[in-house]
Image (cartoon, rainbow, N blue to C red):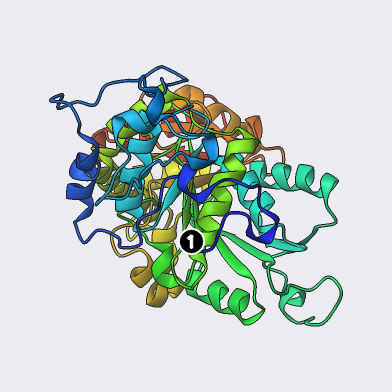
Amino acid sequence: MASPQSNGHPSIPSHHAPKPSSSPSARSLATAAIHGDDPLNSTTDVAPALHVSTTFRYPHDPTLLSPTDDLDIPARGPRDPTPADSHIYSRLTAPNTSRLELMLGEILGAPCLTYTSGLAAFHALLVHINPKVVAIGAGYHGCHGVLDIYRKLTNCRVVDLFDESTWQNDGEAWSLGKGDVVHLETPVNPSGLAYNISHYASLAHARGAFLTVDATFGPPPLQDPFKHGADYVMHSGTKYFGGHSDMLCGVLAVGMREEGWEGRYWGLYGERVFLGSVMGSLEGWLGVRSLRTLELRVGRQSGNAGRVVGWLDGCLNPKDGSEDSKIVKEVVQKVEHASLQKDDMSWLKEQMPNGFGPVFSVWMQTPEFAKRLPSKLELFHHATSLGGVESLIEWRRMSDQGVDERLCRVSVGVENWEDLRDDLMRAFRGLMEDGGGK
């Protein structure tokens, strides 16, 4: 195993950190979400307790005391988890976050680390890889903000992932090369459209670059980026891993595609100790609670979204001239969602075999319609973020000045989809009754 000191990483004794499991579980997602943390059950509680302490007692027996560099925190993998009495200080490990990371490793099929937020995870990834060039597309504006800060401290160059010239200028001073980053978000925020992971994996690996995939909009069981060539997978766990709009969380999973993945894991772990971007114990406890129902929630949310999108698309491309269709076409210009990418189904069905995601975008006919639509709805809260059990809608200009003023982002919850459809239809009628969208 590569040491955490390699490649300029902070010096963290390898036996001071939990050892990642190198053999992903063969359990189904549903079973892993319920039993993935069973090895940590050291008490008779069925529901794991919330541990709020930030520090933990050393052994009372002086003969058991050892200098920090000699402390041995056992592996927290399924065969040898971190016991409850092995924690020292919560910036290193803590009971609730260790349990959450063990479960995430089972679910994602790769060793995982958690962070205070998705953006903290992205920052940690950049600090660890230290790329000279990052290729990134549109997508979540927060990641671009992190890149702007990172560039203040480095000479990193940012290039457009979707610009053909990015892939046609090998050998140029700014071109992608060994150790650089190709960062792909799929499905992408805010539209919900998907991109071919295998395609960008081939482009990245041909240049010696890492493919990092932000899979927030496509959590398990919808897609597994590692199967298609990803080197790192990132999630804003605030969204679907949390699932109840009550916790912040970021997740990095380290792919085991090539030798050296252990060193990358240790490096991320060691750097997190000094970056200080560790989750709090309450958030770790909430994350464990939420993962129990991940498959149930995401499956229903994605199914609901597919039905609502199908209804809207049917109204915009009607086979008859129904009254509902006429009203929808008066206020809605188009709908975007991975399920509507008909020309991409040859690879998309393989990449997302279990559904196309719970988020889609609605482009209204006018900015005024987009601004007023959320206030007409009863079952969709007008709020930013996504992934919770409740449906949300956001006039996206409220939080992202870079998007078109006509766009509303919709995050579908677990409600009855027909109730959601009827709520949207009432809102569309209300917009028309108000006298148009000028």
Task: Give the x, y percent position of residue 222.
Answer: 33, 56
SS at mark 1? helix
Residue located farthest toward the front when viewing the structure as drawn: 63
Query: Between residues 264 and 119, which one lies in front from this camera angle?
Result: 264
Which of the 4 quarters of the picture holds residue 223?
bottom left
Task: Give the x, y percent position of residue 80.
Answer: 27, 48
Query: Between residues 232 and 98, which one lies in front from this camera angle?
Result: 98
Which of the 4 quarters of the picture holds residue 377?
top left
Residue that appears at 63% across and 47% down: 11
Residue that appears at 41% across and 42% down: 72
Query: Between residues 267 and 427, which one lies in front from this camera angle?
Result: 267
Task: Give the x, y percent position of residue 38.
Answer: 19, 40
Residue that appears at 44% across and 34% down: 93
Residue that appears at 31% across and 50% down: 77
Task: Give the x, y percent position of residue 181.
Answer: 66, 64
Q: Is residue 97 left or right of residue 207?
A: left
Residue tagged 1: 262
